Image: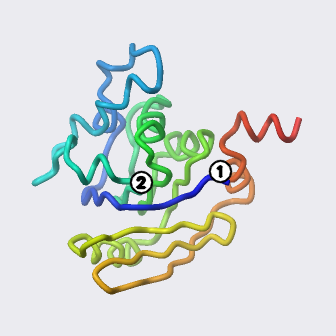
């Protein structure tokens, strides 16, 4: 089964849109792998480097509200997928982006603001990582000698999509 979690990339802003996740000028690329170097290229945050080690090593993104707003393109989840990111955790998601994450076999986890704030309190801790158990609907964040366990809810169908590896794998198993 696919492992969910790992090192965390904190993106402390609401309304991160799909053009910031993968700029539209790269949508003509032929394969998902061709998108890989352009992840978060147009995202502007103080001190953020889209080519930096934190971005390259990230397996989980933590952000604020309305993540993935903008266009409905699947390229945004695809660029996360080819960069090894297995989950995005935010206060809320744009509806189509959220479903595209599940359809691609990745977790889109919504948490209330106070839980997101708790996750952000780990931002400057060394070796911060999040482990995610999609079946049990728990995540464990650790770093700097601290550890917190948080529960989350995902619908049974979306959980089944993620656990199957995405919509295509789910359909192959069921039909």
Residue 5 is situated, as x and y percent measured from the top left of the image, at: 48, 61
Look at 41% across and 84% down and name the residue there.
Answer: 147
Position above or below: 139 against 27: below
Q: CA distance from mark 2 to mark 1?
A: 15 Å
**Of the two numbered discs 2 and 1 in the rendering, the one whose residue sits closer to the viewer:** 2
User: Could you say which disc has been placed on residue 162 in the image?
Assistant: 1
Can you say whether 84 is above or below 122 in the image? above
Counting from the top left corner in percent of width and height, residue 28 is at 39, 13
Q: In the rendering, which numbered label is found on residue 59?
A: 2
Say if 84 sits above or below 133 in the image.
above
| Residue 157, x across and y down, in percent | 74, 53
> Which quadrant, please, contains the C terminus?
top right
Image color mode: rainbow
**Quadrant where the N terminus is found in the figure:** bottom right
Left or right side of 43 for 141: right
Disc 1 crowd rating (10 Å Cα; few below 14, some 14-19, many 20+) is many
């Amino acid at each position: 089964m696919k492992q969910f979690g790992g090192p965390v990339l904190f993106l402390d802003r609401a309304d991160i849109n799909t053009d910031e996740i993968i700029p539209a000028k790269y949508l003509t690329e032929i394969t998902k792998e061709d998108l890989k170097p352009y992840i978060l290229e147009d995202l502007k945050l103080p001190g953020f480097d889209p080519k930096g080690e934190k971005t390259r090593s990230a397996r989980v993104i933590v952000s604020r509200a309305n993540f993935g707003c903008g266009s409905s393109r699947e390229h945004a989840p695809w660029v996360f997928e080819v960069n090894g990111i297995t989950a995005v955790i935010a206060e809320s998601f744009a509806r189509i982006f959220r479903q595209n994450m599940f359809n691609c076999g990745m977790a889109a986890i919504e948490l209330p603001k106070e839980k997101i704030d708790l996750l952000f309190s780990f931002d400057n801790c060394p070796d911060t990582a999040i482990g995610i158990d999609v079946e049990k609907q728990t995540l464990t964040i650790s770093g700097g000698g601290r550890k917190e366990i948080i529960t989350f809810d995902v619908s049974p169908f979306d959980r089944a999509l993620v656990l199957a590896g995405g919509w295509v794998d789910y359909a192959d198993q069921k039909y």
